[in-house]
């Protein structure tokens, strides 16, 4: 499911939430590509490259720097 942040939010971008507990396919995808079954994990796809970022503080800092 894709959502957009509400128009009055300070950060606007499209995102998808995947819950591995409810989605065994995503669990495998997370383990194989991110290296751990740990949440939160942000999957960043940019310029054809994919990065899997763990640690909520790192994710928040990335989102603020990139979209804030
Ligand atoms: N320091 C991490 C903590 C994340 C964390 O503890 N996640 C738990 C669920 S709430 C988890 O996925 N644990 C599984 C694991 O660490 O392998 C953060 O802030 O992102």
Image (tube, grey):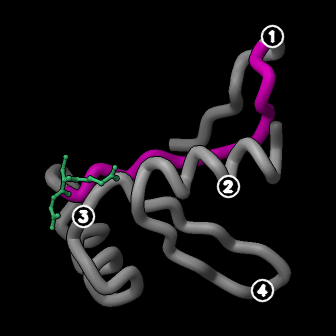
Q: Secondary structure at mark 2?
A: helix
Disc 1 target residue: 8
- Residue sticking out furthest to the top: 8
Q: In the rendered structure, does residue 18 fall within the stretch colored magenta?
A: yes
User: If you read the primary sequence from the N terminus, does the residue marked by circle 3 or circle 4 appear first?
Assistant: 3
First-in-chain label (2 vs 3)? 3
- Tell which circle, 2 or 1, labels the residue nearer the N-terminal end: 1
Write the residue at 50% across / 43% down.
Answer: 1
Task: Choose mark 2 or mark 1, whichever is in front.
Answer: 2
- Secondary structure that dominates the magenta span: loop
CB at disc 4 and ligand 1 closer than 8 Å: no
Q: Which residues are magenta?
A: 9-20
Which picture quadrant has residue 13?
top right
Compared to residue 44, the image places residue 19 above or below, namely above
Q: Earlier in the sequence, mark 2 or mark 4?
A: 4
Q: Nearer the viewer, mark 3 or mark 4?
A: 3
Instruction: Indicate left or right for 34 with 38 as reference.
Output: right
Picture disc at residue 48: 4
What element does badge 4 sit on? loop
The CA distance from mark 3 to mark 1 is: 31 Å
């Amino acid at each position: 499911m894709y959502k957009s942040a509400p128009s009055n939010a300070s950060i606007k971008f499209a995102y998808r939430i995947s819950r591995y507990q409810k989605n065994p396919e995503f669990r495998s995808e997370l383990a194989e590509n991110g290296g751990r079954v740990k949440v939160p994990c942000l999957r960043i796809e940019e310029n054809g490259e994919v990065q899997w970022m763990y640690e909520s503080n790192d994710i928040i800092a990335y989102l603020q720097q990139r979209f804030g």
